[in-house]
Amino acid sequence: MLSVKFNEKDLKVGDTIRVKNTIVEGGKSRIQTFEGMLIALKGRAENKTMTIRRIGPQGIGIERIWPVNSKSIVDIDVVKNAKRVRRSKLYYLRNLTGRMATRV
C-alpha cells in the first residue's frame, strides 16, 4: 500500500481526507475544501500526485488531481483512516454506485 507524508501527516490510499487549497479569482483569494477518498498516489519525489474522489450531487463522481507538494494546498486533514485496503490504486470504485462507492 502506498503512503506519503504531508506536514508530518501520513496519508494512505483509502483514507478519507479533506484538502484545503487556495483559489485566486481576480484580485481576491479564498480557501476551498474538497473532501473525498484518496484513490491513487502516482509519481516519485517532486512529481508525486494524489487523486481524490468524492460523490457529488445526484450520485455523480468527482475526481481531482493535485501535486502533493503544491503551493496552493494549505492543509490536509485525515477525516477517516482506511481499514483494510489491499490495492495501491482504487480505480474499481469508479464502477460502483451508492454506499458501496464510499466504503473500503
Image: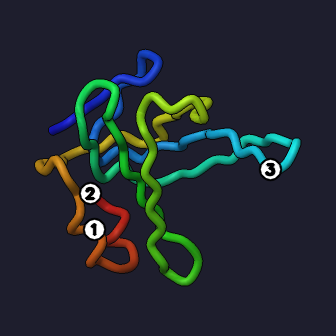
Comparing 83 with 35, the one in front is: 35
Comparing 95 with 103, the one in front is: 95
Question: Is the residue marked by circle 3 packed among few (<14), some (14-19), or many (20+) residues within 10 Å?
Answer: few
Identify the mark at residue 25; answer none if there is no mark.
3
Report which residue position mark 1 lands on. Answer: 93
Seen at 34% across and 70% down, the residue is 101
From the viewer's perspective, is 54 left or right of 25? left
Question: Is the residue marked by circle 2 packed among few (<14), some (14-19), or many (20+) residues within 10 Å?
Answer: some
Location of residue 42 (image quadrant)? top left
Q: Nearer the viewer, mark 1 or mark 2?
A: 1
Q: Position of residue 48 (x, y in %)?
A: 31, 35
Q: Are marks 1 and 2 in contact (CB under 8 Å)?
A: yes
Comparing 99 with 36, the one in front is: 36
Q: Is residue 95 placed above or below 69 in the rendered structure?
A: below
User: Given the current orientation, which residue lies at the most extreme front position?
Assistant: 26
Seen at 41% across and 22% down, the residue is 9
User: Given the current orientation, which residue lies at the most extreme right position?
Assistant: 27
Mark earlier in primary sequence (1, 2): 1
Seen at 13% across and 50% down, the residue is 87
